[in-house]
Image (cartoon, rainbow, N blue to C red):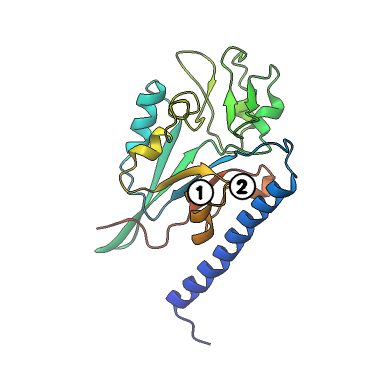
Amino acid sequence: MDISKRHFLTGCGTLIAGFSIYSVAKELAESEAGVSVDQTQTIKYAMVHDENLCIGCNACEQACRQVNHVPDGVSRVVINRTGPFGEYPDQSYRFSRKSCQHCEDAPCVKVCPTGAAYIDSETGIVGVNPDKCVGCQYCIAACPYQVRFINPVTQTADKCDFCRETQLKLGKQPACVEACPTHALVFGNIRDPESELVKTLKSKPTYRAKTDLGTRPKLFHVSTIDGEIVL
């Protein structure tokens, strides 16, 4: 049977979207059923990066660096660019976000000998307490996403914390979200069915990295279809 590429991709997108919606629905159902460790937790922050809307401008990286005082040479968020794909003039690039996944079952937290790495019980954000960190780098070795680093100024472990100590304390969105000119980032409470985050997860097919490890990451990606920049 002759099936066009467009029909094939459409069918795959529908199937993936179904899994995405099921995943979100299951998350919300478990929340209502009180399956989580903290049964009183009403907030669980997550983020979506839409690779189709991302143009690789790096505004998110710069905003994060400025707001969170991230030193040169290291970064809490990196936008990786791959390509070009296709033949000229029909070429495209693809952009993917690399940052902390804020895992629900975080390996970095498990291996930390001092309790410096922790999961915030009120928000689900994976954080680092610099006052407890001894710079042993166990968390860096344990992270399967390779997003942690030693801050050259503080000499302690560092990474994205969804701007928990800066923007969120002011009632704002994370710096990267506010800086994105194409609205490729959506941040919110995955336990609020009316949030823009949940609505996005229900309306677009998404994937998460290395889910086979059982880390249950809360950074979702809308996969690139045709690329973002056409030359």
In the displayed structure, 62 sits above or below 202; it is: above
Give coordinates of residue 226: x percent, y percent.
38, 62
Do the CB atoms of the residues marked 2 and 1 lie less than 8 Å apart? no
What residue is drawn where x is 52% and y is 51%?
194
What residue is drawn where x is 24% and y is 64%?
89
- Distance (Cα) linking label 2 and label 1: 25 Å
From the viewer's perspective, tell me whether residue 159 is left or right of residue 119: left
Kind of residue at badge 2: Lys
Question: Residue 119 or 59: which is nearer the viewer?
Answer: 119
Q: Residue furthest bottom?
A: 1
Q: Secondary structure at mark 1?
A: loop
Give coordinates of residue 121: x percent, y percent.
65, 30
The mark nearer the N terminus, 2 or 1, is: 1
Query: Circle 1 is placed at which residue position?
Result: 195
Q: Dot 2 surroundings within 10 Å: few (below 14), some, or many (20 or more)?
A: few
Residue 204 visible, this angle: no
Residue 116 visible, this angle: yes
In the displayed structure, 130 sits above or below 57; it is: above
Kind of residue at badge 1: Ser
The quadrant holding residue 45 is top right
Give coordinates of residue 14: x percent, y percent.
53, 69
From the viewer's perspective, tell me whether residue 171 is left or right of residue 24: left
The count of marks equals: 2
Q: Dot 1 surroundings within 10 Å: few (below 14), some, or many (20 or more)?
A: some
Question: Residue 85 or 160: which is nearer the viewer?
Answer: 160
Query: Circle 2 is placed at which residue position?
Result: 210
What residue is drawn where x is 45% and y is 43%?
97
Report the mark closest to the observer, 2 or 1. 1
From the viewer's perspective, tell me whether residue 25 is left or right of residue 154: right
The quadrant holding residue 167 is top left
What residue is drawn where x is 70% and y is 36%?
40
Question: Residue 94 or 30: which is nearer the viewer?
Answer: 30
